[in-house]
Image (cartoon, helix red, strand yellow):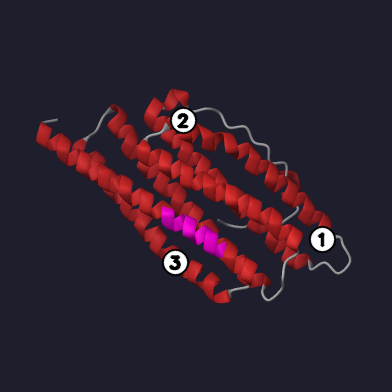
Amino acid sequence: MTTHIVQAFDLELRAITEQVGDLGRRVGEQVANAVRALDLSDALLADEVRAGDEALDRDAERIENDAINLIARRQPLAVDLRHVMAALRIAANLERAGDLASNIAKRAIAVMPSRLPEGMLVGLHRMVELALSQLRDSLEAFGAQDAALAQQVLAQDATLDELHTALFRDIVQHMSAPGAKTLDMVHLLFVAKNIERIGDHATNIAENVVYLVSGPDNVPDRAKNDESSLLATLLPREAE
């Protein structure tokens, strides 16, 4: 490519990267607000989260279209192509994480005006703090092309799985207690699973950063430490 074309490509790629970062920040806000709505039994905030999901979907689609058009027009190679492909995949993961935030808000509305047990909320907060930290760090790693930071996010995936398994067991045990509101606990199980999946999407983003910086042969295999799946088979399935 000529110098002029290279400069134009770099500008377009930078714009896409910035769009991805902005989308990621807004998804993080959606997740935090969805959990806050659950904490506070705030139906208005939950409704705002659900209403905001459509805009996230539109913006993710715009990133996808911009990335595909950039590939078609510029035909990038090697690391440039990996950068565009990583942006495509990351936007898709962010869109799905936004859907999960909307699902959490839906569950928050379903349990209102009940107050969930404090012990359950503590476990949930630990999960969401880690998942949001993973999301922030994975996006920072993408913007800076920082494979070392991405590897740190990957290493945290097992911890989030362990937190989810522990909370899942606590919730199931609480369901059998006298006076337990079983339906509320089922909703909380789904909230916990949604947070765990948000962490998975952050991990996917980190894997794409490693792919971008180091190539496809250097993306590590992911070990799962979430043992809630067997118990989860007893629950109805939920579409993402």
Query: In the rendered structure, does residue 38 fall within the stretch colored magenta?
Result: no
* Percent coordinates x, y for residue 101 in the rendering: 53, 59
Q: Is residue 205 left or right of residue 125?
A: left
* Percent coordinates x, y for residue 226 in the rendering: 68, 41
Q: Quadrant of residue 145?
A: top left
What's the residue type where badge 2 is placed? Ala
Residue, disc 3: 52
Given residues 33 and 5, the one toward you in this image is 33
Q: Is residue 37 left or right of residue 175?
A: left
Residue, disc 1: 175
Residue, disc 2: 148
- CA neighbours of label 1 inside 10 A, class few (<14), some (14 to 19), many (20+): some
Query: In the rendered structure, does residue 31 fall within the stretch colored magenta?
Result: yes
Find the distance from the CA under tag 1 to the CA under tag 3: 33 Å
Q: Taking the image as drawn, is residue 86 in sight?
A: no
Q: Residue at x 53, y 72 (%)?
A: 45
Q: Residue at x 31, y 48 (%)?
A: 18
What's the residue type where badge 1 is placed? Met
Q: Taking the image as drawn, is residue 24 in sight?
A: yes
Q: Which residues are magenta?
A: 25-34
Find the distance from the CA under tag 1 to the CA under tag 2: 42 Å
* Percent coordinates x, y for residue 237 in the rendering: 65, 56
Find the distance from the CA under tag 2 to the CA under tag 3: 33 Å
Q: Main secondary structure of the magenta part?
A: helix
Mark 1 / mark 3, whichever is N-terminal:
3
Residue furthest top as drawn: 217
Q: Which mark is residue 212?
A: none
Find numbered disc 2 in the image and state the secondary structure of the residue it sits on.
helix
